[in-house]
Image (cartoon, rainbow, N blue to C red):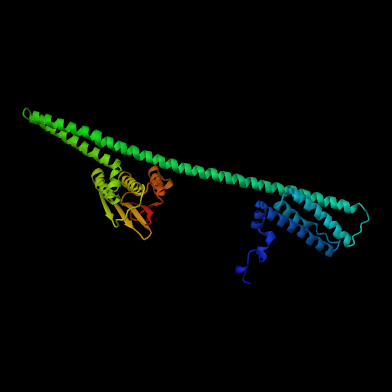
Amino acid sequence: MDPKHQPDGAGPRGLLFWRRDFWRQMISNSDPGAKRWYMAATFALVAVIGFADYITGFELSLLVFYLLPVCMAVAAVGWRFGVATAVLSVATWLVGDNLAGAHYANPLAPGWNALIALCTYLVVVWLFASLIALQREMENRVRLRTAALTDEIAERVRLEKAILGIAERERSAIGHDLHDGLSQHLTGTALVAQALGAKLAARSEDDAAEIGRIVVLIEQGIEQTRRMAKGLLLAEVERSGLVNALNELSLATRTQYRVECSFDSQTDAAPGEGDAATHLYRIAEEAVRNAARHGKARRIGIRWSGEPESLVLEVRDDGAGIPEAARRGPGLGLRIMAHRAAMIGASFGVEQLPGGGTSVVCRLPRPRP
């Protein structure tokens, strides 16, 4: 028979009593039926060794082989049955030697030898039982610690989601305050300044020109406030979709950072339900911000494409590349992006481009219909 197709327990490497899985199963098995089977197997093994001891004669001692059923008894049933098996093994050895014609000059010699053998077996029983108890205690501790670690990880994931949710709500609240509060206040200020400029125009053209420059500065502040509010609000990502939001991000990047920023959409596939679109948008936003601020990029490209099994968001730039500090250990921005990707089941990677610059790639598995 081909060794690869031998049944379990066949072949030299599959001998039943030498397999770790067998001993592990025997130690952890608490089925009464299985214990009875192991007890019967222990008695049969003692009988086989005793018969072999009788056949070989009293000159050759097989006492060491009785350790196998003794250890089997301790592992399968318990230390009490191990002690009983040790006594039975010593008795079997004495009977086998007597039937084989053993004779001693001192009549106390057989008893002394039996006592020494029994004490040795009892020491083995104690050591093996202690080892099994220690192993069971360690396995129990591992199970408890694994369960505690699993609960801790689940709680940490829940808290991270809650923290991100709170952060998004705070961003949205700040965006609304900027849009509905500060922006409106600045608009009112600009109107008042325009009215004041109209009044001063009849008196002094220089004063009217100064008021006009103030109005221009206020209007620029209004525009910046609206851009900041648009970046903080998440409603546009949910309402217009990810493609439109990424396109608006590229337009806002050109104005805010004075760099060339293009958006290329090669698929209209949606990233799925839940917060996937929001997280992808935030990843792109953070990557663009890093490229413009830290990478000193002049050109930034945002691409949304599809592969057979995934949807890909990529942000490329021609900046200075990955900073040395980020190579030694990822910064907070990279860790947040990676965490956002992990929350939606996407892979995240950052690599240095050969010609200079950085590529940030996030692959999201395609949502199943």
Residue occupying the far bottom of the picture: 1
Q: Is residue 334 visible?
A: yes
Residue in the picture at 77% in, 48% down:
123
- Give how far across and how far down residue 325 sits, in percent: 40, 44
- Quarter holding the C terminus is bottom left
Work out whether residue 124 can be spotted.
no
Where in the figure is residue 23, as x and y percent of width and height?
67, 55
Q: How far across and down, in percent of the image, does residue 57 sit?
A: 85, 63
Residue at 72% x, 49% y is: 78
Q: Residue at x 76, y 60 (%)?
A: 44
Q: Residue at x 71, y 57 (%)?
A: 37
In the image, 226: left or right of 61?
A: left
Q: Is residue 111 left or right of residue 136?
A: right
Nearest the eye: 179 or 325 = 179
**Left or right: where does residue 145 sit relative to residue 214?**
right
Residue 350 horizontal side relative to residue 5, left or right: left
